[in-house]
Image (cartoon, helix red, strand yellow):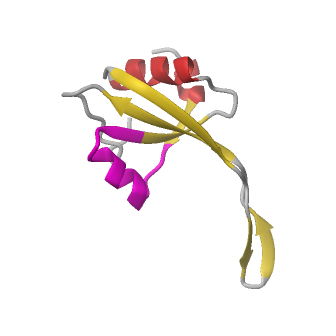
Amino acid sequence: MNERYYDIIVSPVITEKATMASEANQVIFKVAPGATKPQVKEAVEKLFDVKVKAVNTLIRKGKTKRFRGIAGRQASFKKAIVTLEEGHSIDVTTGL
C-alpha cells in the first residue's frame, strides 16, 4: 500500500447530505488542498478496491462562527464527491 494515498484522502465526510449521496452511489471525502481529480480517483481505487466513475471537487471556504460569544474561524478545506461504478460500494462507517 502506498503511503501517499493516505496523504491525499484525509477523511470521509459523514453528514446528512453525504448519507443521501450514498444512495446515488456517491461517497464524499475531505481531501488534501493540492490533490487533483486523477490523484483522488487513483487513491480511492487503490485504498478501497473499487472502480470510480467520476470525481467532482470543491473548496469549502472557511467561515467565521461564534461559540459562547467568542468569534472563531473554521478552516477552508477541499471536498471530493466520488461517484462509483454500478455494483461497487464503500462503507465509510467502518475504519480502514
Asked if residue 22 lies in the magenta stretch, the reply is: yes
Identity of the residue drawn at 43% across and 58% down: 15
* Quadrant position of the N terminus in the picture: top left
Against 82, is 52 above or below? above
Displayed quadrant of residue 69: bottom right
* Quadrant position of the C terminus in the picture: top left
**Residue sticking out furthest to the bottom:** 69
Identity of the residue drawn at 31% across and 45% down: 22
Locate residue 12, reporting x and y percent.
46, 43
Identity of the residue drawn at 30% across and 36% down: 90
Locate residue 61, reporting x and y percent.
71, 51
Tell whether 91 sits left or right of 39: left
Against 32, is 73 above or below? below
Asked if residue 81 lies in the magenta stretch, the reply is: no
Locate residue 11, reporting x and y percent.
51, 41
**Residue situated in front as seen by the camera: 9 or 95:** 9
Q: Is residue 22 in sight in this rendering?
A: yes
**Residue situated in front as seen by the camera: 2 or 48:** 48
**Residue situated in front as seen by the camera: 72 or 21:** 21
Identity of the residue drawn at 39% across and 60% down: 16
**Residue sticking out furthest to the right:** 71
Tell whether 34 sits left or right of 86: right
Against 53, is 93 above or below? below
Number of marks in the rendered image: 0
Q: Is residue 3 in sight in this rendering?
A: no
What residue range appears in magenta? 12-27
Displayed quadrant of residue 8: top right
Displayed quadrant of residue 36: top right
